[in-house]
Amino acid sequence: MERGSTKLETVTGDITAQSDLDAVVNAANAQLMPGGGVAGAIHRAAGRELIDACRPLAPISPGEAVVTDGFGLPNRWIIHCLGPRYGIDEPSDALLTDCYRNALRLAERHGMRAIGFPALSTGAFGYPFEEAARVAVDAVDDTLETLQSPPELIRFVFFSDADRQAFDAVLNAV
């Protein structure tokens, strides 16, 4: 699917194995340290150097994004976003929108042409999947219109086919 000059695509797979992307987005915790889910997988794949790179950047607030090198990942960069905890960090929709907006602005600033996003805030942070998908699609669409040099590719990487299909339904409805 195309949004202006940017191709949007969805895949089921491992976000740490997206070797054709300049950057992947980490569903980070406030301290930018290893955890479960996406953050744990990215930290394991990137290696111990990532902890040292993250330490001086923490803590971050919901909606904030920071960038580090990719270290052991096949990607040059990692963009770390702290999504909102649903029902706790309010307004959740605005904070989740900020995650996508800030990540894409960092991507533009660093000349990243291809970026991969997980389903931010939908795991342990409890954001209902379809609601989070609507926020993600709207945030990406709105932000792409404001960028001077939008990325050529935005890939949404999902752990399951069911999540990818649910996201595709939202993406195709917009």
Image (cartoon, rainbow, N blue to C red):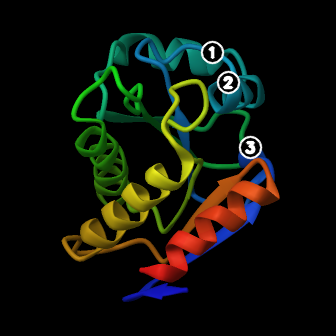
Q: Amino acid at mark 2?
A: His
- Residues at marks 2 and 3, CA–CA distance in whole angstroms: 9 Å
Q: Amino acid at mark 3?
A: Thr
Q: Quadrant of residue 148?
A: bottom left
Q: Is residue 29 visible?
A: yes
Q: Judging from the image, what secondary structure is the residue with disc 2 in?
A: helix
- Residues at marks 2 and 1, CA–CA distance in whole angstroms: 6 Å
Instruction: Report the front residue among 103 and 86.
Output: 86
Q: Judging from the image, what secondary structure is the residue with disc 1 in?
A: loop
Structural crowding at the residue carrying mark 2, measured as other residues with C-alpha within 10 Å and reported as few (<14), some (14–19) or many (≥20): many
Examine the rendered structure and indicate whether residue 154 appears above or below residue 42: below
Instruction: Report the front residue among 51 and 42.
Output: 42
Question: Could you say which disc has been placed on residue 43 in the image?
Answer: 2
Report which residue position mark 1 lands on.
Answer: 34
Q: Position of residue 106 (x, y in %)?
A: 32, 50
Q: Residue at x 60, y 38 (%)?
A: 70
